[in-house]
Image: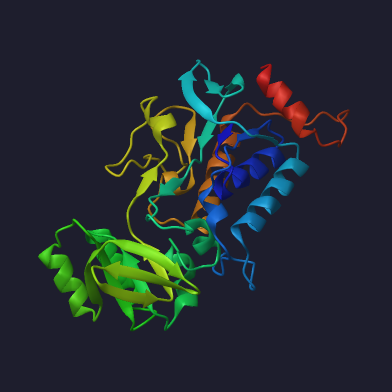
Amino acid sequence: MIIGGGPAGLTAAVYLARYHRRVAVFDAGHSRARYIPESHNYPGFPDGVSGETLLANLVAQATRYGVAIVGSTVRSLRQAHPGFRVLHDQGELRARFVLVATGIVDTPPVMDGLDAAIADGLVRYCPVCDAYEATDKRIAVYGSGRDAAAKAKFMRTYSAKVTWLRPSGHDPCAEDLHTVAEAGIAIVNSVDKLQREGPRIRALSGANAYLFDLIYPALGCDVRSRVASDLGAAVTNDGCLKVDEHQRTSIEGLYAAGDVVSDLHQISVATGHAAIAATHIHKSLPPSPRDSSEGATVPSAHSTYDQLHNA
């Protein structure tokens, strides 16, 4: 069973289904990938691909092999020896192995019309993903602390017009200020409001206003690892699940992949994790050699879910 219907979870589902394993994906519909207007650094899409399109393609691919996509939130896991009891909004089921691919949630800025600004590419979260498309534009990084300073410095690779916007109520660190200033980055303190102005973002600091082509919030994120950590899985100081080279957590039979285990929040990294985890899960299950009398019909997603639910 896979918790999370983002690129990691759906990729693992495809692999497992093609290994002729019964698999269900529980998806609450909150994948971070949905907020990508268009990615140009994911391999195989030279003209770019939106997060919605990529997820739709992955769902179509998974369900073609009989994967059940269940629109339900997993509330908790309990060890069942062997395997796990999975409690979700619609009941519970048993699974021999569980893969956690729940990702992260970025902390958003307070701003009217935020969703539309994200869809239009004015507010962006991942400079590794799309900073190339911001080359030579007026870029702002909004946040306080070392992560924001580091993101602002990273953006200097792409533009000479980078500004670090610091929210009101946060005292600057002298070392961070020096690092940013040394990189030729402007600093605006006490920013108390962000608003959209046509194709730009306006930042207000007292009576002063500043216009930018786009803004990268750097306000932190919430790692959605609780369903595993509540079971006792080991986590890092940032809340990411600790895994080994096979994507195994510290709980036997519990795997994790994608942003929930890595601070390099990239789709290609997540799908790599998924392939490793799914293959190790398959090899860890009892062999299931094909009977010569078995047909070639792919099971339906509904029948796969029923089999898991009744196991």
- Extreme front residue here? 207
Image-quadrant location for residue 208: bottom left
Image-quadrant location for residue 22: top right
- The residue under the point 52% across, 35% down is 99
Vertical comparison of 11 with 294: above or below = below
Q: Nearer the viewer, residue 192 or 245?
A: 192
**Quadrant in the picture for the C terminus:** top right
Q: Nearer the viewer, residue 198 or 252?
A: 198
- The residue under the point 48% across, 44% down is 257
In the rendered view, how is the structure colored?
rainbow
The number of callouts visible is 0
Can you give x and y, in whole percent of width and height, for residue 267 in the image? 52, 56
Image-quadrant location for residue 179: bottom left
Vertical comparison of 301 with 207: above or below = above
Can you give x and y, in whole percent of width and height, for residue 64 in the image? 77, 43
241 sits left or right of 182 in the view: right
Q: Nearer the viewer, residue 242 or 302?
A: 302
Can you give x and y, in whole percent of width and height, for residue 238 in the image? 30, 44
Vertical comparison of 134 with 294: above or below = below
- Extreme left residue here? 174
Can you give x and y, in whole percent of width and height, for residue 94 in the image? 59, 20
220 sits left or right of 81 in the view: left
**Quadrant in the picture for the N terminus:** top right
- The residue under the point 40% across, 53% down is 108
- The residue under the point 44% across, 30% down is 227
Vertical comparison of 31 with 68: above or below = below
